[in-house]
Amino acid sequence: MLQLSAVEAAKAMLGWHLIKYEDSQKLVGRIVETEAYDQTDQASHSFKGISPRAAVMFGPPGFAYVYFTYGMHYCFNVVVGESGHGSAVLIRALEPLEGQSTMKKRRGTNNELMLCNGPAKLCQAFDISRDLNGHDLHKQPLMLMSSSIDGEIVATTRIGITKDSHRLWRFYIKGNKYISKA
DNA sequence: AGAGCGATGGCCT
DNA sequence: GGCCATCGCTCTA
């Protein structure tokens, strides 16, 4: 699945589970919103070729690309596509399935809908930061498990970008309450 | 060596 | 709906 193009992988990954193993507990979230980024796409960190920051995007699929932005936020991506091709899927929102109490503590809210409904929010809830950049998602502590969905997929423009903003490369599960923005 | 700019979220109105 | 905090990365000189 993960060797697919960014767009195909972004759609296929809806419904997958993201699992984080911590000392005495497990956090689980279901992917409900994604965005595709590709080296042919000006909005992508890989557009200008291999840089130290975006190097992971050009590696084999199934690894984590975590970057820091706006001086305060982390965003989590899954590297997809063939090795040598710079593409990744940004995970924008999760539906919390397990470990909600820890997520609530980290996020400072008791509202289930607000725990993982944004790329930086889910990183805070799952405690994902720079040290997981380049991590193999087939291994603990952070893992990806494939799953399928029944729901319909909606495609829209991506959020918060200016270049190549016409592409309909954002995908979410129709009607899901946990997406960042309808 | 240095300036400018974000794949944003939270809080305020 | 609008504004602002805050800093690593990239590009330019």
Image (cartoon, coloured by chain):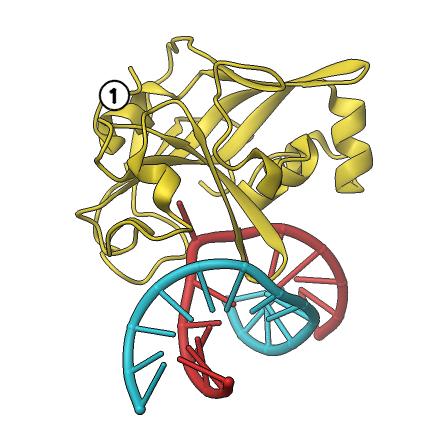
Chain colours: A yellow, B red, C cyan
Residue type of the residue flagged with mark 1: Gln
Q: Is residue A133 above or below residue A41?
A: above
Residue positioned 62% across, 36% down in the render: A128
Looking at the rendered structure, the number of numbered marks drawn on it comes to 1
| Quarter of the figure with residue A86 | top left
Q: Where residue A140 appears, x then y in whole percent?
A: 60, 15
Q: Give the crowd class for mark 1: few <14, some 14-19, many >=20 residues within 10 Å.
A: some
Left/right placement of residue C8 relative to residue A124 reads left
Q: Which chain letter matches label 1?
A: A
Q: Is residue C11 above or below residue A51?
A: below
Q: Is residue A110 above or below residue C13?
A: above
Residue positioned 26% across, 32% down in the render: A6
| Quarter of the figure with residue A35 | top left
Q: Where residue A60 appears, x then y in whole percent?
A: 31, 26
Residue under label 1: A3
Q: Quadrant of the C terminus of chain A?
A: top left
Residue positioned 29% across, 49% down in the render: A50
Q: Where residue B12 appears, x then y in whole percent?
A: 75, 70
Left/right placement of residue A147 relative to residue A76 reads left
Q: Where residue A124 appears, x then y in whole percent?
A: 67, 40
